[in-house]
Amino acid sequence: MSPAPEPERPEAPAGIDASVASPARMYDYYLGGTQNFASDRRAAQEIYTLIPDLPEIARDNRAFLRRAVRTLAAAGIRQFVDIGSGLPTQGSVHEIAQEADPASRVVYVDNDPLVPAHARALLAGGTEGTTAYVAGDLREPDAIFDHPDVRALIDLDRPVSLLLVAVLHFITDEEDPWALVGRYRSRLAPGSHLAIAHATRDGRPPEAVRKMTDVYRRASAPFTFRTREQILAFFHGSRLLDPGLVHSPRWRPEPGGPLSPSAAWNYAGVGVIPAER
Ligand SMILES: C[S@@+](CC[C@H](N)C(=O)[O-])C[C@H]1O[C@@H](n2cnc3c(N)ncnc32)[C@H](O)[C@@H]1O
């Protein structure tokens, strides 16, 4: 007899289709969060059959994000736009940036309909005037940068850190993510930074790549693995900080930090936009 289907959580807010897995909720599940539904957990479990260390890959990715924000804050950057921010989790960008300087401005952007309610709860405690959440789509750079809540916090005439961490692989080649990133870059002041992490299929078992691609095709957004060369092309027009574009756990690892075997699924790098373009 097959097991009874896992019940959907009754608290799925109105307007959320809990029956179709979503990248934001699946990622929450990989990270051990609770903002996910049975469809997300089933989709994740299907991937785990071929990529059992996916939770570790997600944690590595998250750790890269934190190290990048710490590095950028130490370099004096006080404005952060985090697109594809995901459901709030510990060690969020504003916590790290505002540890360096409580006046640092942070805007989160995501297109998942579950994110707003959780983000509002996260931002309730004393972050007004420095931190905001905007519902927006990465594919609409001008709508994001011209959004009144973004304009209220972010001065595009001054350096900004644009964080595109584990989100560009949700943009298909047909949607031309390189042109999209170029549009963002063209609106950023010199001295701005671009932090990118992106899934790669380089050297990965083709069967595992196929499984993950197939599961996300049935979810609310497809997933596109890219080669290192394709990911490097996102940094066109910027200068990569050391150590360049590397597997994410190798990007400025913390002293003594273990290099996990999952290292090879994700490339990460941070570029700075020079004065002369
Ligand atoms: C894998 S999570 C990454 C979260 C976070 N950036 C991190 O690295 O820990 C990807 C997030 O990107 C969001 N996303 C996917 N496509 C998007 C789009 N076109 N516009 C905005 N957000 C998007 C998803 O909803 C999800 O929350």
Image (cartoon, grey):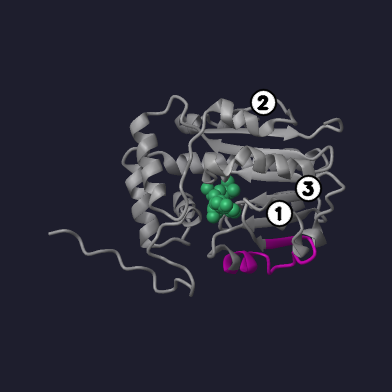
Q: Is residue 255 visible?
A: no
Amino acid, disc 3: Ala
Coordinates of residue 249 in the picture (x, y in percent): 56, 32
Q: Is residue 52 placed above or below 253 in the rendered structure?
A: below
Q: Which residues are magenta?
A: 117-133
On the rendered image, what quadrant is the C terminus found in? Answer: top right
Residue 38 on the magenta segment: no
Q: Nearer the viewer, mark 1 or mark 2?
A: 2
Nearer-the-camera pick, 73 or 200: 200
Measure how far apart labels 3 and 2 are at the Cα level: 24 Å
Check disc 1 and report the residue beneath it: 94
Check disc 2 and report the residue beneath it: 244
Nearer-the-camera pick, 189 or 132: 189
Check disc 3 and report the residue beneath it: 100
Q: Is residue 241 left or right of residue 8?
A: right
Q: Nearer the viewer, mark 3 or mark 1?
A: 1
